[in-house]
Image: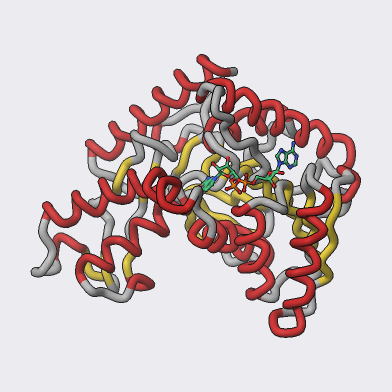
C-alpha cells in the first residue's frame, strides 16, 4: 500500500507529476492538496476520469492539511508565482514561509513521511525543510538536479542523434548557476564520451550551457516546466516505492561525503530506496569537479545566509 501526497497539487508541476505517477500505476492513493479548492477538485476529477486507462489509484483532493496523514511520501511543489511588483528575494521569502508552514503541519500530522521538496530555490528550501522537520537527512530531501540531469541527457542525445535513454551523465552541486557537469564519468551506452570518436568538447560544452539556461527558456516560452519535472519526480518516487535503490542526484544535507559537511543541501550521486536516502555512491571525481562541488556548497551557504 502506498499513499503519495502532492502539496501544490493544482499547479503545473503538481499536475504533470500526478499524471505521470498514475501512468506508472505504482501508488494506491494519490492525494492532491492545494490552497485553491476549485482548481484542485477540478484536477482531481480530470485525473480520476483518466484512471480507467491508467491505473487502479484512488485520487483524493482538498485543502485540508489533515489529508497529509498516512502519506508515505509527500512531494512539495507548492509555491507562489512572482507578482509584478515583487522582488526575487520577496518571492523566496514567501516560498520559505510556505515550506515552514507545511513542515510544521507534517510535524503534527505525519512526522515519519518521506518529504521531497520541489519548490524553488530547491536546495535552500530543502535545507530549510530539513531544519524545520525531523532533521533526518534520509527522509527530508529535494529534487535538486534530477530534472537538470534528465534535461542534460536529452540535450546531449539530441545533438548527436543518440537514444536519450542510453546517455548517462550527471549534474551535481547546486540547482542553479554553479551546477557541476561530471564529464569524467559521462557515457553513452556504457562507453565514456571521451572515447567515442564523434564527440567533441565544443558540442558537449554547448549542451551544458543549454541545460543551465533551459529553465529560463522554458519559462520564457510557456511559463514554466511541467513534463520534464513531472517525470523527474516520478523517478525519485518510483525508486522509493519499489525500493529500486537508483542513483539519483537529489539534493540532501551531506554527511561529509565528497568532503562536504552539513549546513547546506546540494546534489550528490545518491542511492534512493524504500527508506529514502540510503547512502551516496562514492565516486573518484576529477579535481576540478570536486572543486566545483565546494564552490556550489559555498554559493548555497551564502544564499541561505542572505535569506534564512
Ligand atoms: N526543482 C525543480 O527542478 C523545479 C522544476 C520546475 C519547477 N519548480 C518549482 O516548482 C514550483 C511550482 O511551480 P509551478 O509551475 O507548478 O507553479 P504553479 O503556480 O503552477 O503551481 C503552484 C501551486 O501551489 C499552490 N500553492 C501556493 N501556495 C500554497 C500553499 N501555501 N499551500 C499549498 N499550495 C499552495 C498554488 O495554488 C498552485 O496551485 C515553483 O517554485 C517552481 O520554481 C522546481
Residue 286 appears left or right of 249: left
Residue at 78 percent across and 61 percent down: it is: 42
Residue at 70 percent across and 84 percent down: it is: 53
Q: Residue 151 location in percent, x, y?
A: 38, 57
Q: Residue 287 location in percent, x, y?
A: 23, 37
Question: 280 or 163: nearer the eye?
Answer: 163
For residue 129, which quarter of the picture?
top right
Compared with 265, 144 (above or below) is: below
Question: 260 or 232: nearer the eye?
Answer: 232
Residue 35 visible here: yes
For residue 298, which quarter of the picture?
top left
**Visual colour scheme:** secondary structure
Residue at 68 percent across and 37 percent down: it is: 136
Q: Residue 231 location in percent, x, y?
A: 54, 63
Residue at 60 percent across and 41 percent down: it is: 119
Compared with 168, 253 (above or below) is: above
For residue 96, which quarter of the picture?
top right
Q: Residue 187 location in percent, x, y?
A: 26, 64
- Quick check: which quadrant has ligand 1? top right
Residue 190 appears left or right of 100: left
Residue 306 appears left or right of 283: right
Question: 35 or 3: nearer the eye?
Answer: 35
For the C terminus, the image quarter is top right
Residue 1 visible here: no
Amino acid at each position: 500500500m502506498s499513499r503519495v501526497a502532492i502539496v501544490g497539487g493544482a499547479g503545473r508541476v503538481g499536475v504533470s507529476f500526478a499524471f505521470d505517477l498514475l501512468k506508472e500505476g505504482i501508488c494506491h492513493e494519490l492525494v492532491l492538496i492545494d490552497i485553491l479548492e476549485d482548481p484542485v477538485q477540478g484536477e482531481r476529477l480530470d485525473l480520476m476520469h483518466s484512471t480507467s486507462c491508467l491505473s487502479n489509484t484512488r485520487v483524493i483532493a482538498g485543502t485540508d492539511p489533515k489529508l497529509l496523514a498516512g502519506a508515505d511520501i509527500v512531494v512539495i511543489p507548492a509555491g507562489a508565482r512572482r507578482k509584478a511588483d515583487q522582488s526575487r528575494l520577496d518571492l523566496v521569502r514567501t516560498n520559505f514561509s510556505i515550506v515552514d508552514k507545511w513542515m510544521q503541519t507534517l510535524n503534527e500530522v505525519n512526522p515519519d513521511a518521506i518529504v521531497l521538496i520541489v519548490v524553488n530555490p530547491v536546495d535552500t528550501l530543502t535545507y530549510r525543510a530539513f531544519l524545520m522537520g525531523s532533521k533526518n537527512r534520509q527522509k527530508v530531501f529535494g529534487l535538486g538536479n534530477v530534472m537538470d540531469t534528465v534535461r542534460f541527457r536529452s540535450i546531449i542525445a539530441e545533438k548527436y542523434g543518440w537514444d536519450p535513454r542510453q546517455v548517462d551523465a550527471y549534474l551535481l552541486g547546486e540547482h542553479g548557476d554553479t551546477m557541476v557537469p561530471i564529464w569524467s564519468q559521462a557515457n553513452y551506452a556504457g562507453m565514456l564520451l571521451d572515447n567515442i570518436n564523434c564527440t567533441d568538447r565544443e558540442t558537449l560544452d554547448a549542451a551544458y550551457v543549454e541545460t543551465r539556461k533551459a529553465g529560463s527558456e522554458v519559462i520564457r516560452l510557456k511559463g514554466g516546466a511541467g513534463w520534464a519535472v513531472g517525470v523527474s519526480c516520478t523517478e525519485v518516487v518510483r525508486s522509493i516505492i519499489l525500493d529500486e535503490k537508483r542513483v539519483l542526484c537529489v539534493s540532501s544535507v551531506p554527511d561529509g561525503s565528497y568532503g562536504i559537511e552539513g549546513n547546506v543541501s546540494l546534489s550528490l550521486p545518491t542511492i534512493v530506496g524504500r527508506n529514502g536516502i540510503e547512502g551516496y555512491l562514492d565516486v573518484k571525481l576529477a579535481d576540478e569537479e570536486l572543486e566545483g562541488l565546494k564552490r556550489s556548497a559555498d554559493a548555497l551557504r551564502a544564499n541561505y545566509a542572505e535569506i534564512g
